[in-house]
Image (tube, rainbow, N blue to C red):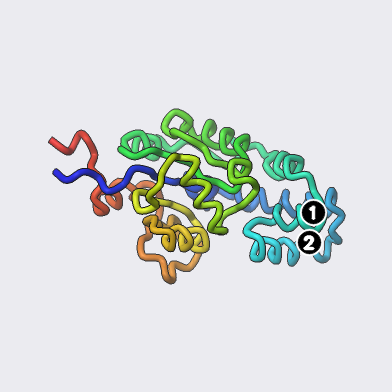
Amino acid sequence: MAPSPYRVLFLDLDDTVYPSSSGLWEAIGDRILSYMVEVAGVPAVRADALRDEYFRSYGTTLTGLRIHQGVDPHDYLRYVHDLPLERYLAPDPLVRAILAEVPLRRVVFTNADRAHANRVLARLNLTEVIDQIIDITDLDWTPKPLEAAYTKALAAVGETDARACVLVDDMVRNVLPAERLGMTGVLVGQKHSSENVHLRIDSLHQLPDLLRDLGVVYPREAA
């Protein structure tokens, strides 16, 4: 049997390792608006539109707030992620089993910080099946979908060939730059349009079949 063409599985965090229907991302969005108004001093009537403008222009609301309002990124991240995860997330044993069997390096690649990633993974009982976390500080505050974020992620895992990587993300705009660099991009969920995205799954439950279709070899099946 031919060897697997891939070595690294990059996984986004929010709305990717758990379903977008959880409501967590919407709750984080509410915290972002609250921070903008209560801490950064943005007028309430402008906050929603400005959040969208920063998100579209800079990749994250945080980047825009750092540039234009001079916010402390660590303070911002602590504030917006200060939520009771047990209200939104529950472990999915099938997702854990699926990730445990993936014969690739399993890397969470997120625009959030490591503290949030660790809390989410712990709540989902996924900590032990993730090999590495690449967070926004590892990216020197350069978020997806900027190309530099992907090259920094490749360097962080010690990979020189983007073609050896699969990236799973819930946002089209994050998948397309990965594909342009040579990664195999996969859109997960049904939250966004799939125009121009070649591969799509509804949830991580479909990941094993997709990886097999891509030629990933599972050791227990190689005999």
Q: Which residue corresponds to the image point at 27% horizontal and 50% vertical from the top-left? A: 209
Q: Is residue 37 left or right of residue 108?
A: right
Residue 189 percent coordinates (x, y):
45, 56
Kind of residue at disc 1 = Met
Q: Residues within 10 Å of mark 1 (few under 14, many from 20)?
A: many
- Location of residue 36 with respect to 155 vertically, above or below: below
Secondary structure beneath label 2:
helix
Circle 1 sits on which residue?
Answer: 36
Q: Residue at x 48, y 61 (%)?
A: 177
Q: Quadrant of residue 54?
A: bottom right
Q: Is residue 61 left or right of residue 122?
A: right
> Looking at the picture, does residue 148 appear above or below residue 114?
below
For the point 52% across and 35% down, the residue is: 121
State the image coordinates of residue 45 (x, y, percent, origin top left): 83, 65
**Circle 2 is placed at which residue position?**
47
The label on residue 89 is none
Q: Are marks 1 and 2 in contact (CB under 8 Å)?
A: yes
Q: Nearer the viewer, residue 196 or 193?
A: 196
| Residue lying at 38% horizontally and 60% vertically, measured from the top left | 200
Can you say whether 145 is above or below 78 in the image? below
Give the percent coordinates (x, y) of residue 158: 44, 40
